[in-house]
Image (tube, rainbow, N blue to C red):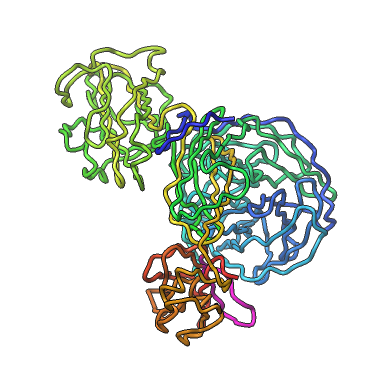
């Protein structure tokens, strides 16, 4: 149980080491695949929508179908993909796509054993609902979008499809080389049939790879060889290409008959492998990383039962704690008072170790302007920490000039980050910096830390006061700095590393900045409740991605003495008294007074109504507009064929009164029909 400490601000514990621990247990046999039609499994992916459900497909020669199985191999269904041919399906992935909050299946028609095909095809389709215990069903999935891809160099065989959960970029990995290539199709990927020329982002130090997956958190990558499984860690803010540019770690794997399929579990508790053949087994390798679930407790209002109030203003406060450290706390509201997705998120780590930095390493005098947020560093090179030279452990090697005996004294570093609100961070912040030799750190132009440097003014020729050597080079210096220097919007942390002398052999730099240690005291933003029951959900997440949630139901009571569903105060405002019938349409606009009450429109003004008055052409897309009201949330649906109904293209859109607009850049055909739906209205 966390200690209960009430606070206005959020103060979080933080371990400033990124959690990516490539330690996994030995093989566990989870069961035999009981889908008789799965006889040449080539790809597997964990559902993000359906717990303990996995998507599997066969290799070339099979119809255009995928299979759903649970983690023990039980067959849950066969799903045919309408409109997507099966030439040589080689891999499958699950990740985000065009509609926020919707999980998509990506199917790779990408095999090419003889390097003869110019194009590769990836289908993208929303995940259907599947229960892990259901009897097997047969369905056809409609609405798949096809992404046409072309490699930038030459025709190659590819057997790995991966989707980056951080930014929705799509990756293919070639197969038949000793050092294979990784290609990227950046988001958004066109689905209009026009081929996308992929970007070659890196060449791996390994080859003959047959499948892969990026973890749901985005910070771990697995790619499979016939006899090995390779693992890469990925730092916060690091691209997939940069993460894969280093040598991988080999993790446990017992070679299978012809094992090609591999995927992470949805909770990142380990990975599954699956081989081609009849009656094959699903094998699981558990993660040995941190699996301790954080604790989160609501302190006020007191939990237990329904909290009833006649006060429309609400703030919920409590605590969270974890054995390693709480990374962030998120707040959600559903019911009478809803918000779009995550109402608010407070990150505990502002600048993690291994971040990307801009740097200047040409020996120039940068003066003082470079320390400010307004400074334009777009011409500076960029690289991932650790940065430096001379030790051999640098992720990014910087220059010391042309004379090894007279190296540049000063190298400059900058990192920009943004905050929606600075209020949660107006507390002492924890700074840790690795420096060799001397360092001066600035936050938004103000000096906050210096070490191994003389007092007084520092110039680009000022030498460090000591030569850091041996084990001292590995030690992080810690300090507490003033979080009140942060602002809402753009912030910059600027660092200068100084050599002891021009003949010094090396420099090193890495840094982290975050909230200090201790139990997390959180407070939700104050919200204005709508009449009815609102569920407030608070989720704490640790650095390993473990999550725990607590929620409270709040009933905001407003009197409805005549029982017509319309609050008395609302009726008095618009009608001067109670009318006892929410089914009336007082302004004859086609919407009942009860519908207008929920929509937030005016029941005595026929021009005030929830409708789509305007759809305009906007480049290659269409912009849809509608009148919106404070505190409401909307879903936008589209149909190109009214006989097949409407599908959501944007969900949980928060109101931006007096009008919302949404641009649809994926118009499917010559005719499109749109529907606006008030979330929560049945």
Q: Position of residue 24 (x, y in %)?
A: 66, 31
Residue 622: name its quadrant: bottom left
Residue 545: name its quadrant: top right
Residue 391 against residue 113 in the figure, above or below: above
Q: Residue at x 35, y 12 (%)?
A: 469
Quadrant (top left/top right/bottom left/bottom right) for the N terminus: top right
Relative to the observer, which residue lies in front, 88 or 662? 662
Residue 111 visible, this angle? yes
Q: Position of residue 46 (x, y in %)?
A: 67, 49
The reply, left or right, for residue 456 in relation to residue 358 is left
Q: Which residues are magenta?
A: 635-650
Residue 537 against residue 521 in the figure, above or below: below
Q: Residue at x 51, y 53 (%)?
A: 309
Q: Is residue 452 magenta?
A: no
Q: Position of residue 224 (x, y in %)?
A: 65, 41
Residue 242 against residue 678 in the figure, above or below: above
Q: Is residue 645 magenta?
A: yes
Residue 443: name its quadrant: top left
């Amino acid at each position: 149980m966390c200690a209960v400490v009430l606070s206005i601000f959020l103060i979080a514990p933080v371990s400033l080491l990124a959690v990516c621990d490539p330690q996994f247990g030995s093989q566990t046999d989870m069961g035999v695949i009981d889908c008789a039609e799965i006889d040449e499994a080539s790809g597997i992916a964990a559902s993000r929508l359906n717990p303990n459900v996995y998507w599997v497909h066969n290799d070339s020669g099979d119809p255009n179908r995928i299979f759903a199985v649970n983690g023990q191999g039980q067959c849950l269904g066969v799903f045919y993909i309408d409109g997507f041919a099966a030439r040589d399906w080689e891999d499958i992935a699950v990740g985000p796509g065009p509609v926020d909050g919707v999980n998509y299946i990506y199917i790779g028609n990408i095999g090419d054993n003889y390097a003869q095909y110019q194009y590769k095809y990836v289908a993208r389709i929303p995940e259907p609902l599947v229960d892990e215990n259901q009897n097997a069903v047969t369905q056809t999935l409609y609405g798949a979008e096809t992404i046409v891809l072309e490699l930038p160099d030459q025709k190659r065989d590819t057997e790995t499809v991966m989707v980056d959960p951080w930014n929705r970029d799509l990756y293919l990995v070639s197969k038949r080389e000793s050092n294979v290539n990784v290609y990227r199709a950046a988001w958004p990927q066109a689905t209009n049939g026009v081929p996308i020329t992929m970007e070659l982002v890196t060449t791996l130090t390994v080859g003959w790879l047959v499948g892969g997956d990026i973890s749901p958190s985005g910070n771990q990558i697995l790619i499979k060889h016939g006899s090995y499984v390779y693992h890469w860690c990925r730092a916060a803010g690091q691209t997939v290409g940069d993460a894969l540019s280093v040598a991988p770690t080999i993790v446990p794997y017992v070679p299978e008959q012809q094992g090609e399929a591999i995927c992470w579990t949805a909770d990142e508790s380990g990975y599954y492998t699956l081989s081609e053949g009849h009656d094959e087994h699903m094998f699981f390798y558990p993660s040995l990383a941190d699996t301790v679930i954080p604790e989160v407790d609501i302190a006020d209002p007191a939990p237990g039962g329904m909290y009833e109030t006649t006060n429309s203003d609400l703030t919920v406060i409590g605590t969270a704690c974890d054995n390693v450290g709480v990374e962030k706390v998120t707040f959600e509201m559903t019911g009478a008072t809803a918000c779009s997705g995550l109402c608010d998120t407070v990150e505990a780590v502002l600048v993690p170790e291994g971040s990307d930095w801009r740097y200047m390493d040409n020996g120039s005098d940068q003066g003082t302007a470079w320390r400010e947020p307004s400074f334009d560093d777009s011409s500076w090179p960029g690289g991932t920490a650790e940065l430096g030279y001379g030790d051999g452990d640098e992720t990014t090697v910087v220059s010391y000039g042309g004379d090894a005996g007279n190296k540049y004294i000063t190298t400059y570093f900058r990192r920009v980050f943004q905050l929606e609100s600075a209020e949660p961070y107006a507390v002492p912040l924890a700074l840790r910096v690795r420096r060799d030799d001397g360092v001066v750190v600035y936050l938004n132009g103000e000096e906050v830390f210096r070490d191994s440097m003389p007092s007084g003014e520092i110039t680009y020729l000022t030498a460090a006061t000591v030569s850091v050597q041996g084990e001292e080079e590995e030690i992080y210096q810690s300090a507490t700095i003033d979080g009140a220097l942060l602002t809402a919007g753009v912030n910059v942390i600027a660092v200068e590393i100084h050599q002891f002398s021009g003949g010094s052999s090396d420099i090193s730099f890495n840094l982290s900045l975050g909230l200090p240690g201790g139990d997390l005291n959180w407070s939700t933003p104050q919200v204005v409740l709508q009449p009815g029951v609102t569920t407030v959900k608070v989720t704490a997440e640790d650095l390993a991605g473990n999550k725990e949630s607590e929620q409270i139901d709040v009933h905001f009571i407003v009197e409805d003495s005549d029982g017509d569903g319309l609050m008395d105060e609302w009726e008095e405002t618009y009608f001067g008294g109670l009318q006892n019938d929410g089914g009336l349409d007082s302004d004859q606009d086609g919407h009942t007074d009860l519908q207008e009450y929920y929509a937030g429109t005016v029941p005595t003004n026929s021009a005030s109504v929830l409708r789509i008055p305007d759809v305009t052409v906007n480049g290659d897309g269409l912009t849809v507009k509608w009148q919106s009201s404070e505190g409401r949330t909307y879903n936008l649906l589209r149909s190109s064929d009214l006989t097949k109904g409407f599908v959501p293209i944007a969900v949980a859109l928060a109101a931006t009164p007096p009008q919302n607009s949404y641009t649809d850049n994926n118009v499917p055909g010559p005719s499109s029909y749109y529907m606006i739906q008030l979330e929560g209205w049945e």
